[in-house]
Every structure is written in structure tokens, then in C-alpha cells.
Image (cartoon, helix red, strand yellow):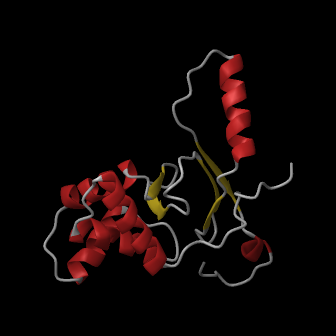
């Protein structure tokens, strides 16, 4: 199968671009991107690999903010609901969404060695999953595919890279 135009051909946005896009999307939707939610999103985008809730909490505490896990989880829930981030269930971590303004499923290539994640967003994969679900009379509401393996850098034995 040939990669689709949306399957990673675009460079991921920079942190400032991602934050500006999140701000715009939230305004358009009438959602409130509070200072804390924005900071959590910034932490996720600044992380070289997907990051867990407790690591986010540690960064917030390093900022001098008092906080507890429920505070971080509420911010993460908001960011997930707005489609600004993805949760990778196999690792229980969060990563920024490359295309938050577009409704899409998610397919991810996850390097088990260095932790790098590539978001594919392949319509071909999503269509195939929908077709298979339909054959089985299964009502598909969302899809998330996590493929675990080794990135090209780790296959070559190169030092871990920062995306």
C-alpha cells in the first residue's frame, strides 16, 4: 500500500504553531483554553517523546504551580475532547495531534527503543477498518491503531533522536 498524502508527509507543527492553532480552534468552538490547559498542551508539544500525566505534573510543579493529579487529568480530558492531543493507551502517554482541525482516527508507529511516535492519519487504513467492521455488522465509533516496533534510527543503532 502506498502512503497516502495525509500519512505523515507534512512536517509536524512547531510548538508555537500548535498552540496558536489550539487557541484558534478553541475560540471557534466556544471552548476555553485556560492558562493551565495551554501549559499542559505546551508541555506535551515540547516533550521529545510522548509524555505521561505524572511527568506533566512534575513539569508543572517545576514551574512553581501547586497541583494534584486530578488537575492534570482534567486538563488532559479537555485536550482529548477537543482533539488537540492523542492518548497512546499501550504506553499510557499523550502526544500532540498533528491535525487537530480535522476529524480523523489515529494510527501511530511507536518505537519501543527510543519512544519516538509517528502519527500517520491514513484514510486508507481507516477505510479498511470501517469496511472490516461493516462486514461484521460492528458499529465503529472511533479507531486508534498503535503499531509497536523500531524506528529507522534504532534499527541502524544510531543514538536516540529527537523529533
Q: Is residue 145 left or right of residue 1?
A: left
- Residue 2 position, x and y percent, is 86, 53
Q: In this view, does 54 lie above or below 123?
A: below
Q: Position of residue 161 (x, y in %)?
A: 64, 81
Image mark count: 0
| Left or right of residue 37, residue 105 in this image | right
**In the image, residue 95 lies at what x, y percent?**
48, 63
Above or below — where is 135 with respect to 58? above
- Quarter placement of the C terminus: bottom right
20 or 129, which lies in front? 20
Out of 122 and 159, give the one closest to the viewer. 122
Which residue in the rendered view is the most extreme toward the front? Answer: 28
Q: Report the side of 12 relative to 23 (left or right).
A: right
Say which residue appears at 48% left-offset and 48% top-offset.
Answer: 89
The one nearer the camera, 58 or 41, is 41
**Left or right of 12 in this view: 27:** left
- Residue 81 pos. (x, y %): 36, 48
Instruction: Identify which residue is drawn at 64% across, 69% down.
Output: 113
134 shown above or below 2: above
Rendered residue at 20%/55% (across/down): 70
Please identify the quarter of the rendering in which residue 8 is found: bottom right
Q: Nearer the viewer, residue 84 or 117?
A: 84
Q: In which quarter of the image is residue 7?
A: bottom right
Amino acid at each position: 500500500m502506498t502512503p497516502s498524502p495525509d500519512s505523515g508527509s507534512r512536517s509536524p507543527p512547531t510548538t508555537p504553531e500548535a498552540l496558536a492553532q489550539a487557541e484558534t480552534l478553541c475560540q471557534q468552538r466556544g471552548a476555553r483554553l485556560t492558562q493551565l490547559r495551554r501549559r499542559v498542551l505546551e508541555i506535551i508539544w515540547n516533550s521529545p517523546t510522548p509524555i505521561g500525566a505524572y511527568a506533566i505534573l512534575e513539569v508543572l510543579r517545576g514551574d512553581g504551580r501547586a497541583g494534584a493529579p486530578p488537575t492534570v487529568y482534567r486538563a488532559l480530558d479537555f485536550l482529548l475532547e477537543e482533539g488537540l492531543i492523542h492518548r497512546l493507551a499501550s504506553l499510557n502517554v499523550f502526544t500532540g495531534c498533528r491535525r487537530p482541525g480535522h476529524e480523523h482516527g489515529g494510527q501511530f508507529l511507536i518505537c519501543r527503543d527510543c519512544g519516538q511516535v509517528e502519527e500517520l492519519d491514513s484514510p486508507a487504513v481507516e477505510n479498511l477498518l470501517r469496511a472490516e467492521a461493516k462486514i461484521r455488522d460492528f458499529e465503529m465509533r472511533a479507531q486508534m491503531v498503535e503499531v509497536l516496533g523500531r524506528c529507522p534510527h534504532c534499527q541502524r543503532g544510531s543514538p536516540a533522536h529527537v523529533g
